[in-house]
Image (spheres, rainbow, N blue to C red):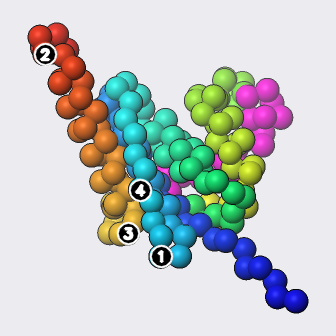
Amino acid sequence: MTQKKERVIEIFTDGACSGNPGPGGWGGILRSGDKEKELSGYSANTTNNKMELLAAIHSLEALKKRSHVELTTDSSYVRDGITKWIHNWKRNGWKKSNKKPVENRELWERLDAVASKHDINWHWIRGHTGHAENERADTLATTAIQKGLNKEMDSDPAGELN
């Protein structure tokens, strides 16, 4: 009897913000064998941490079946949050060790829910150091910001956004 090989998905994510807070974008690259899919999105007023979280969330939500995932991010906030801090946050009623509420709780809960559907190894890399997929994810995120800003300007012919 041959055993079916588990499907491995590689995901590379990045978030970007023009100002913090400010207009933001996120990007994700999903790879399975020789197939790739790129995802990106925009938010008009956000933070870099939210964009980093949304990159991971949307990338994982794009998976149709339970998968073994190798997820690479340049955000230690995302990697440490989901692998180390979240357990205590949940145990302590979504409060940090200083008793203050966890920022971005709704995004952490969403990431926790989607991550629980998969077997994930979380990898951190230093950003902007020439890692090809991280650079592509960053380009997706920054391009999403520009597209979003252009749409806002296109939808405001009177120039009231200035």
Estimate how packed mark 1 is, as few (under 14), some (14 to 19) or many (20 or more) residues with alpha carbons within 10 Å.
Answer: few
Q: Which residues are magenta?
A: 73-94
Report if residue 52 lies within the magenta region.
Answer: no
Q: What kind of residue is marked 3?
A: His
Q: Quadrant of residue 4?
A: bottom right
| Residue located beneath label 4 in the image | 38
Closest to the observer, 124 or 71: 71
The vertical placement of 59 against 70, above or below, is above
Number of marks: 4
Q: Residue at x 29, y 38 (%)?
A: 145
Q: CA distance from mark 4 to mark 1?
A: 13 Å
Q: SS class of the residue under badge 1?
A: loop
Q: CA distance from mark 3 to mark 1?
A: 19 Å
Label 3 sits on residue: 131
Label whose residue precedes the other's in the sequence (2 or 3):
3
Q: Are marks 1 and 2 in contact (CB under 8 Å)?
A: no
Q: Tell me the kind of residue under disc 2.
A: Pro
Left or right side of 73 for 23: left
Main SS category, magenta section: helix
Report which residue position mark 2 lands on. 157
